[in-house]
Amino acid sequence: MLAVAVWGLGACSLDFDALERGRRDAGTDLDARVPPPDGDVVPDAAVDAPADSGSAECTGSGSCDDPACTGQPCDDGLACTMGDVCVGTICRGSNRLCPSDGCSMQACEEPSGACVQTDALPDGTACPGGRCCFGRCSNLGESGNCGGCGLGCDEENCTAVVPRRCVCVTNAGCPLGQQCVSGNCVCSADNQCAAGQTCVLATGHCAY
């Protein structure tokens, strides 16, 4: 042990061996707590924190597996759905509806997303604006219909006034065996009318 005299404080004793032992025992911890050169202390949490991955990507296949995507738009890969969103871990959308004029039933077809006719209502069924004819709504005043679906006129001409009839020159220009009277085709039996029609004998025209 070495005794050192300090001016004005008297004598004191310093145990340099004990100081050296203490430095060896605690040296590692002391060095670990030395702040960086710039003086900023780096918290332990900052070292362990995961990197920010940004916002969740919810549009790819299987993307709804990320809980952050719940309620977010996604893509289920189907052409016949719309408004797809993540519900739980599944991407779901509403069925795409196909327009109809009241005479045909249409459905969306995968993978094209096109609307195709799956069924048609019987000819003569009432629809907005007329009657169903070959799966579409018609006013049955078109050339070739003349008041009934399928009542095709050889001359493909109908009267402009109701009841509409085929305009004719001879019996050959009338459908289903009707007779040409005064330039118009006239029925005399129900079998001379379109499906679902009956012949109005008083006027000689077909009606639903």
Image (cartoon, rainbow, N blue to C red):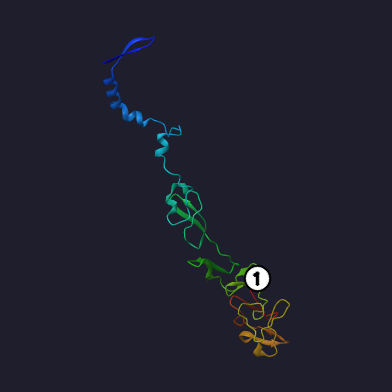
In this view, 29 is above or below 102: above
**Relative horizontal placement of residue 190, taking residue 54 as reference (left or right):** right
In this view, 102 is above or below 48: below
Tell me what residue is drawn at x 30 percent, y 25 percent.
23
**Relative horizontal placement of residue 181, taking residue 151 as reference (left or right):** right
Residue 72 rendering spot, x and y as whole percentages:
50, 50
The one nearer the camera, 28 or 184, is 28
Tell me what residue is drawn at x 60 percent, y 72 percent.
136
In this view, 5 is above or below 200: above
The one nearer the camera, 207 or 11, is 11
Residue 4 rendering spot, x and y as whole percentages:
32, 14
In this view, 51 is above or below 193: above
Q: Quadrant of the image for the C terminus? A: bottom right
The one nearer the camera, 2 or 81, is 2
The one nearer the camera, 152 or 10, is 10
Element on which disc 1 rests: strand
Q: Amino acid at mark 1?
A: Gly
Q: Which residue is mark 1?
A: 130
